[in-house]
Amino acid sequence: MIYASNSTEDRIAVFPPGACGDVAPARTIEGGRTGLAEPRSLSLDAWGRLHVANRKTATVTVYAPDAQGNAAPLRVLAAEAMHSADAIVVGHDGGVFVASRAVGTIAGQASIVHFRSNSSHSDYTITGHRTGLTHPVALALADDGSLLVANAFGGVVAAYAAGSRGDATPLRSFTAATTSTQGLACCANTLLVSGTNVYVYSSGAGTGAQPAAVLARCPMLPLGYAGAVAIQVARGTPNTLIGVADSANAAVHLIRTCGVAPALRMAAVVSIAGPATGLGAVVGGLAFA
């Protein structure tokens, strides 16, 4: 399934695999009971529960796998240290990481807030001057368990060791090819960094790293501006599916790739776009199930 958030109309649209064109979603989550408030980043846990970062209320709302319509969340995550909820990623153990920043933030004020599986209360944060956090807007987890964080301005992507907390120094970092990062996704040692285009790196990228591939606007890919990204690798096959949220065109582009990761090439592209999709002006988050 393909999950996309409409940040302007407080809606989550869920599309079936193979969706293409101006197609209505299979189901939506929207309404006053949902708690959605400028929903941005999306992440699913191992049990299929959808986690949504709500920027306006600085909360995370969690929904049952089959939630639809005006469904109330299973629980709501909030914390004193969570001044915003700009990005989210859920680990294999169900632990939830949320990117937070304060208005006018400088290094040491932004933070990553962690919640244990099935808990609505934070147990620790990553914050402080040594973290290098400035404006965290996207999160991902690498195959080795390290937490990847993209900072919006300057394009720095940093990796923190599994279990890092407090004023932790990154294991490694690099400046992405885009100086205004918007999204991160990681799977099978392949890291996507978005902002204008989609840049493909090894998940272990460090100082001086250069993208192994760039997925940019072309006749095959009618990309306006690359926002949130998602990646899925089919088990037992080399096929990689990349999703790109394109708010410039109120669309989601689904890219089938070929080649050996991370040096991927576009093989085929389909787009979900049009008034029936309900995607709206700002596609704030994207996730595959």
Image (cartoon, rainbow, N blue to C red):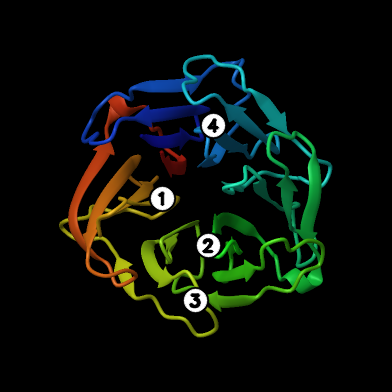
Q: Mark 3 or mark 4, which is nearer the start of the sequence?
A: 4
Return the residue at label 1.
230
In three-dimensional space, the C-alpha distance between marks 4 and 2, rounded to whole angstroms, equals: 20 Å
Q: Residues within 10 Å of mark 3 (few under 14, many from 20)?
A: many
Q: Residues within 10 Å of mark 2 (few under 14, many from 20)?
A: many
Return the residue at label 4.
49
User: Under tag 2, what secondary structure?
Assistant: loop
Q: Mark 3 or mark 2, which is nearer the start of the sequence?
A: 2
**Disc sitting over residue 205 in the figure:** 3
In three-dimensional space, the C-alpha distance between marks 2 and 1, rounded to whole angstroms, equals: 13 Å
* Picture coordinates of residue 138, whole percent (x, y): 56, 55
Return the residue at label 2.
142
Please identify the quarter of the rendering in which residue 18 is found: top left
Q: Is residue 264 above or below residue 55?
A: below
Q: Residues within 10 Å of mark 4 (few under 14, many from 20)?
A: some
Amino acid type at mark 4: Arg
* Picture coordinates of residue 189, whole percent (x, y): 43, 66
User: Under tag 4, what secondary structure?
Assistant: loop
Q: Is residue 190 left or right of residue 145?
A: left
In three-dimensional space, the C-alpha distance between marks 4 and 3, rounded to whole angstroms, equals: 30 Å
In three-dimensional space, the C-alpha distance between marks 2 and 3, rounded to whole angstroms, equals: 11 Å
Amino acid type at mark 3: Ala
